[in-house]
Image (cartoon, rainbow, N blue to C red):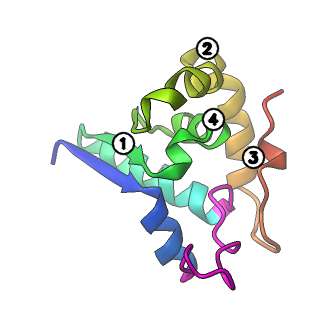
Amino acid sequence: MDFLSIGTNDLLQYLFAADRLNADVAGIPDVFDPDVLRLVASVCAAAAEHGAWVGVCGEAAAEPRAAAAFVALGVTELSMTPNAVQTTYRVASPSSSGAWHMLVRRRSATRRSAPATPAPLRYP
């Protein structure tokens, strides 16, 4: 195994058993849910143990706050459209990863009692 790729659209759909195309349940999946963050962190840790890198694709990879969270968790590659690269890099760059690392670790340590929102992950 050389790498792992996490597709955020499918990951969220299967983890929350909620189809993003179904308006009745589309709002349930949340990339900032502590369970999602822990799952991504565990995949990154397992990949690192085997010398593999982890990439993320899907809509969340191009959302700057989510991308920064993924980088803080150990994701090494983000797949996005070219027009999203500059903004995402500014937020998720290595120079800002320390602050994101702290915020994401704090969020992933919480229990899920209600739907999560990106608010706790605002960059300081």
Closer to the camera, 28 or 24? 24
How would you classify the magenta stretch by its main secondary structure?
loop
Closer to the camera, 79 or 117? 79
Q: Is residue 64 above or below residue 108?
A: above
Q: Look at mark 2 in the image and give the residue it sits on.
A: 95
Label 2: element kind: helix
Q: Amino acid at mark 4?
A: Pro
Q: Mark 3 against mark 4, which lies toward the viewer?
A: 4
Q: Amino acid at mark 1?
A: Gly
Q: Mark 1 against mark 4, which lies toward the viewer?
A: 4
Q: CA distance from mark 3 to mark 1?
A: 23 Å
Q: Is residue 73 above or below residue 46?
A: above
Label 4: element kind: helix
Q: Is disc 4 surrounded by few (<14), some (14 to 19) or many (20+) residues within 10 Å? A: many
Q: Are marks 1 and 2 in contact (CB under 8 Å)?
A: no
Q: CA distance from mark 3 to mark 2?
A: 19 Å
Quarter-wise, where is residue 91 in the image? top right
Q: CA distance from mark 2 to mark 4?
A: 14 Å
Residue 106 is labelled as 3
Q: Amino acid at mark 2?
A: Ser
Residue 100: say if magenta. no
Q: What stretch of residues is rendered in magenta?
A: 17-34
Residue 64 is labelled as 4
Q: Amino acid at mark 3?
A: Arg
Q: Write the residue at 81% across / 37% down.
A: 122
Q: Look at mark 1 in the image and give the residue it sits on.
A: 55
